Image (tube, rainbow, N blue to C red):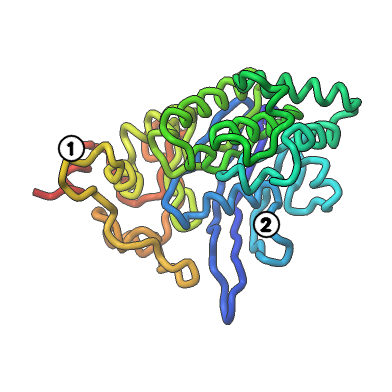
Amino acid sequence: MENRVLTIDNVRLSFPVYQGQVNVLNNISLHIDRGEIVGVVGESGSGKSVTAMLAMRLLPAGSYHIHSGAITLMGHDMLNLTEKTLRDIRGSKVAMIFQEPMTALNPTRRIGKQMVDVIRQHRPMSLREARARAVELLADMQIADPQSVLKRYPFELSGGMRQRVMIAIAFSCEPDLLIADEPTTALDVTVQRQVLRLLKQKAQATGTAVLFISHDMAVVSQVCDRLYVMYAGAVIESGNTGEVLQQPQHPYSIGLLNSAPDKGEPRTPLLSIPGTVPNLARLPAGCAFRERCFAAGEACGITPTLQAHDSAADRQAACWYPQRENAHVCDAINPQ
């Protein structure tokens, strides 16, 4: 497809460990089109960040093994590119915003120097032109005195300001794809809202596709057009964000939504999904969620595939017993 920016197709990835392997990604598939903001949600350990790192080939060489599948970014076969080609693509075609900007920014170099270096790495600009571009980018992030910020070190800025700088750097070369790995986790609610608004506005203005990784359903509902829900290294539900959040079909998605703090009552324990994420070194046969699932049945001994369960082809769930009635869902999770 002409508008397709990223395609991850049935990727299986493991990390070798002593006398075995940890199956981190299990036939994961997803895609992003130009101009879309696509969310990926799930518990810690579901494979969200590994998926993002693999899409940019940022995992250390030799630390993982690809068993099958392909990743295509703007026509490039990402799993078979040379390191030189990857350096050219990173920044110009795909960029990333990390969860903690203090670990992404160089603490010993001024903000201006870091921004200018990134811009000149991918654009044929003079030092003066690159610096003017950096000022323009910071101004787009609604930073009041961009000239002053360019002269500062990362530790001299607040968390929200550092994250705005990271967004500015990510958009500096107008990439086709931006990967945001929980970019607002370390920020307070007010700053979080500002950063999300700026990220969405900038993406819409440039036509950049965004892969937005989060564990916060409230954040995802504000910015994402489509949503993928991951569990144990696989996508278990996908669809338009509003549909997935309002009428989830997979029992795991239902559990995630019911575990949100705003669903709780004062002075009562928060709801949670019973059990824990399965050991990825010894995944159970069949559906990986069945031991924690309120709707599990005999068919769950066979691994379900991601498929549509109604007339909407873009609304899919990997479940033998998809849930369709909210009343039934609530009763199943909170039996009287």
Total numbered labels? 2
Q: Secondary structure at mark 1?
A: helix
* Viewer-side residue, 316 vs 160: 160
Mark carried by residue 148: none
Which residue is painted at 72% across and 35% down in the image? 111
Q: Position of residue 218 (x, y in %)?
A: 38, 34
Q: Earlier in the sequence, mark 2 or mark 1?
A: 2
Q: Which-is-in-front pick, marks 2 and 1?
A: 2
Q: Mark on residue 59?
A: 2
Q: For the residues marked 2 and 1, what is the alpha-carbon distance in whole angstroms?
A: 43 Å
User: In the image, what residue occupies the spot 68% across and 43% down?
Assistant: 105
At label 1, which amino acid type do we have?
A: Ala
**In which quadrant of the rendered view does residue 21 lie?**
bottom right
Taking 83 as reference, is 243 above or below it?
above
- What is the three-letter code of the residue carrying label 2? Leu
Image mark for residue 327: 1
Residue sitting at the far bottom: 19
